[in-house]
Amino acid sequence: MSATWSNWAGTVTASPEVLRPRTPEALAEAVRDAGRWGRRVRPVGSGHSFTAIAEPADLQLSLEHLSGVLAADRATGRVRVLAGTPLRVLNQALDLLGLAMPNLGDIDAQTVSGATSTGTHGTGAALPGLSAGIVGLRLVTADGEDRWVDERDPALFAAARVGLGALGVITEIELACVPAYRLRALERPDSLDAVLPRVQELFDAHRHFELYWFPGTRRVQTKANDLVGDDVHEPLAEWRRRLDDEFLSNTLFGAANAVLTRAPRAVLPFNGIAARALTTRSYTAASHEVFCAPRTVRFVECEYAVPRESVADVLTDLVAWVERRREPISFPVEVRVAAPDDLWLSTGYERANAYIAVHQYRRGAFREYFAAFEEIVAAHDGRPHWGKMHALGVEELSRLYPRLDDFRDVRDRLDPDRVFANDYLTRILGA
């Protein structure tokens, strides 16, 4: 069946043949058939990547029916889950089991395999990205072979946990989860000049810390999340949640962006008003309820990981560029932190990073802004998030990712005929 497909941001569209296998066995058979007929295959989850990483060349394999928890061991925290399970579904299932993910990003629409395959992370100086929590995965390779991958095959395990869908199709993932926990969220407005000199201290002072800078202002919003006991229940009032998270952050913000697109000179003054309207709030909730928030206003995004110690320099240069150019940037800039890991194509490979993400309303002008940001982070060995927009190719990436050539060797071994290739993978990995 053919259908028009678009990713969430609307930056990529295609009209592939779409298969929706209901079992891992049916998926493996589809891959074998594609290889036999010389067709190229791309798996797709929720389409939440801003790049063309999921763009199908010939055949698209939707994982929508491969969803749900297969097994869970509360004693060890090991949970086996089908690869197409959306994070929001996984979070609810884990909560019922008394378990939780050690860390999450702020969007829970992605599938577990899509999020981990592109190197999705949250924030926390002692916490690596989500892929580091994978202890095993089931991979269907180009010849249709179904293989279990874990630490017994160290090279493939290091490659496949952030595999970009280039090594095969993941059908099942085993995660190392932790006992369910509660967090106290403290969100408050502050000044950039007060926060930036202390940002390293703030990263280390909290289990999770992030900040949002409003372009055209010297104002930020900080978010600090820390553990509290299971008996601490200080929920956010429902009226406040609806006002802040639904009306102000989505309904009103979306309407404002639609208007501001036609009046770009008003964007930065609007940011000043929005930043001054922010107030402090504090509440406690289950971890996934604190991490994840609804996102109905569609945008485009570019995110780079830079060494932790470079974050103030990068943000200072970005602030200076915006002040000089007065570009109409309506979305705040997000700054987070994460611990190093040993996954070959992880942005955190053997490096503690700060993550800086720039966004723009999907109908707004973004190319000059993103290009300027990429030029700034290039001076600090910035590594791009695989699911976010960037302009780098295999030559630049080989310098930034020390194990990229090793990854390419594994790809040559598992997919010599490039059954899983598309134009994006050719650009970043080579032909």
Image: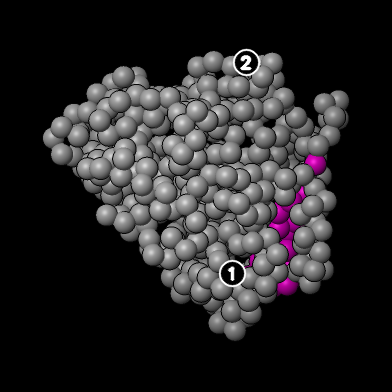
- The tag on residue 380 is 1
In the rendered structure, which amino acid carries the disc numbered 1?
Answer: His
- Residue 399 percent coordinates (x, y): 47, 63
Q: Of helix, strand and loop, which one carries label 2?
A: strand
Residue 310 can be seen in this image: yes
At horizontal 58% and vertical 58% (from top left) the residue drawn is 305
Query: Image height check: is 363 above or below 292?
Result: below
- Residue 415 percent coordinates (x, y): 28, 40
Specify which label sits upstream in the sequence, 2 or 1.
Answer: 2
Asked if the magenta segment contains residue 211, the reply would be yes
- Going by the image, does 179 lie left or right of 31? right
- Residue 260 percent coordinates (x, y): 52, 68
Image quadrant containing the C terminus: bottom left
At horizontal 49% and vertical 57% (from top left) the residue drawn is 401
- Residue 220 percent coordinates (x, y): 73, 63
- Going by the image, does 408 lie left or right of 262? left
At horizontal 60% and vertical 62% (from top left) the residue drawn is 306
Provide the major secondary structure of the magenta segment.
strand
Corner quadrant of residue 56? top left
Foreground residue among 301 and 420: 420
Asked if the magenta segment contains residue 30, the reply would be no
In the rendered structure, which amino acid carries the disc numbered 2?
Answer: Asp
Q: Of helix, strand and loop, which one carries label 1?
A: loop
Name the residue beneath numbered marker 2.
73
Region rendered in magenta: 209-226
Is the image coloured rainbow, by chain, by secondary structure, or in one colour? one colour
Foreground residue among 352 and 219: 352
